[in-house]
Image (tube, rainbow, N blue to C red):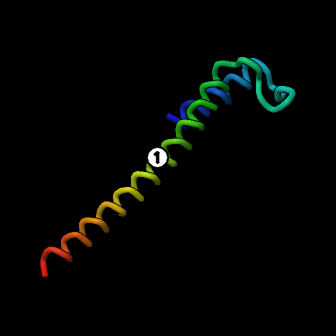
Amino acid sequence: MRERVAELVAASRRADNPAPAIGGQAAGDPLDVLALMFSRLDQRAGELAEYADRAHIAGQACEWSYDSLNHR
């Protein structure tokens, strides 16, 4: 999906305005907004995945500690 959004943004820039926008981003361009949204969603998904991984590892460590104390 990210690739498709990048293709759409590039095609839009070629067709509508070959010069880059002043300040780096076109104000109010729906494709730029969509691309930015996907970028932020992807970043946040990565952060949440890292949190979930850490929570899973901590949970397993807790289970192993509990099991080692109760299975002497």
Relative height, residue 37 to residue 50 (above, below): above
Relative height, residue 15 to residue 45 (above, below): above
Q: Quadrant of residue 63?
A: bottom left
Q: Residue at x 75, y 18 (%)?
A: 16
Residue 37 in the image: state x and y as whole percent.
59, 30
Left or right: 15, with 65 as reference point:
right
Please name whichever residue, 53 or 16, is drawn nearer the observer in this view of the structure. 53
Q: Tell me the quarter of the image containing the C terminus.
A: bottom left
Q: Secondary structure at mark 1?
A: helix
Q: Residue at x 59, y 37 (%)?
A: 40
Residue 11 in the image: state x and y as whole percent.
66, 26
Please name whichever residue, 7 or 22, is drawn nearer the observer in this view of the structure. 22
Relative height, residue 36 to residue 65 (above, below): above
Q: Residue at x 34, y 58 (%)?
A: 56
Question: Exactly how many numbered labels are in the figure?
Answer: 1
Identify the residue at the far right of this view. 22
Left or right: 41, with 27 as reference point:
left
Q: Amino acid at mark 1?
A: Leu
Identify the residue at the far bottom of this view. 72
Q: Quadrant of residue 32?
A: top right
Residue 13 in the image: state x and y as whole percent.
73, 25
Circle 1 is placed at which residue position?
48
Residue 10 in the image: state x and y as whole percent.
68, 30
Q: Quadrant of residue 61?
A: bottom left
Q: Residue at x 46, y 46 (%)?
A: 48
Relative height, residue 70 to residue 51 (above, below): below
Please name whichever residue, 29 or 54, is drawn nearer the observer in this view of the structure. 54
Left or right: 71, with 47 as reference point:
left
Crowdedness of circle 1 by 10 Å Cα count: few (<14), some, many (20+)? few
